[in-house]
Amino acid sequence: MHNSLWDTTTISYMGCAAQLFFFFFFILAEFYLLTIMCYDRYVAICKPLHYGTLLGSRACAHMAAAAWTAGFLNALLHTASTFSLPLCQGNALGQFFCEIPHVLKLSCSHSGYLRELGLIGVTASLSFSCFVFIVFSYVQIFRAVLRIPSEQGRHKAFSTCLPHLTVVSLFISTATFAYLKPPSISSPSLDLVVSVLYSVVPPALNPLIYSLRNQELRDALRKMMTTCFLRSNKLHLFFCRTLIV
C-alpha cells in the first residue's frame, strides 16, 4: 500500500520478511477456515439433528484456533527458512510483493533451496488433505440435497453452499496454478495476474459473496440505493429549476 501511494518500488529486507510472513499466515489461515466452513455446511445439511452437538461454540472456537495456529506455525517456518538463505542473485523481485518462489530465485544455496522446497511440499500435502476433505464433503452434500423432495428445499440448500464453493474454487484453482504451473509457460506478466487472482480477488469477494445472502443487509443496501437515487433526482430537479430561472 505504501509503494502504491508513494509510487515507489522498494522494500526493506525486514519489511519483505514481514510481508511474506503475514501473507503466508493469512492465506493459509483462510484456506483452513474455508475447510472448516465446508464441514459446517456438511453437518448442517447431512446431519442437521447433530448440528448443536458437533458444532457448538466450544468446538467452533477450537477449530478456529487450530486454523490460526496452523497458519501461524507454517508461516513462521517458511519465513525463517526462506530468509536464512544467502541471497546472491541481486535484489530485484519480479513481483508486486515478496513471495517465496521469487525470493528463492535470488538464493545461491542449493541445500537451503531444497529444504524450503521440502517445507513447501509438507504444506502442499496438508493443503491437499484439506482439498480432499472439501471434495468429499461436497459429494456427500450434493447427494443429500438431491434427496430433498421439495424444490424450495433444494434451492435453499444449494444457495447455502454456492457462495462458499465459489470462493473455494477460485482460491484453489488460482493458487494451484501459481505454484504448480510448468516453468515453460511462466512469465512475469502471467505471474503477476495469477498472484492478484489468488491473493487479492478471493478476500475482496468474501464480504460481497457471503453478506449478500443476509436478507437484512440486502434490504439495507436496497434502501440505501433507493435513497441515493431519490436524492440525485431531487438534486437534478433543483439544478434544472435554477437554470430555468
Image: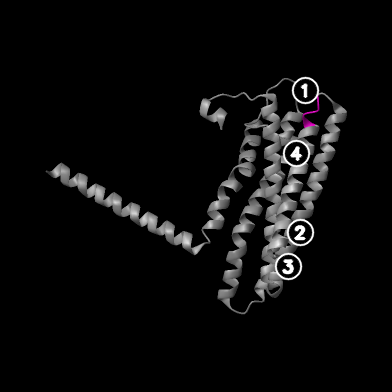
Find out whether the residues at labels 4 and 1 contact each other: C-beta distance under 8 Å: no
Residue 153 place in picture, x, y as percent: 58, 74
Element at badge 3?
Answer: helix
Residue 67 place in picture, x, y as percent: 73, 51
| Most common secondary structure along the magenta stretch | loop
Circle 3: residue type: Leu
Tell me the residue that label 4 is attached to.
Answer: 182
* Residue shown at 53% from the left, 53% from the top: 208
* N-terminal label among 2 and 3: 3
Whole-Å distance between the Cαs marked 4 and 2? 26 Å
**Quarter where residue 134 is shown:** bottom right
Whole-Å distance between the Cαs marked 2 and 3? 17 Å
Circle 2: residue type: Phe
* N-terminal label among 4 and 2: 2
Highlighted range, magenta = 82-87
Q: Return the residue nearer the eye: 79 or 202.
A: 79
The answer to whether any part of residue 186 appears in the image is: no
* N-terminal label among 3 and 1: 3
Quarter of the picture containing the C terminus is top left
* N-terminal label among 1 and 2: 1
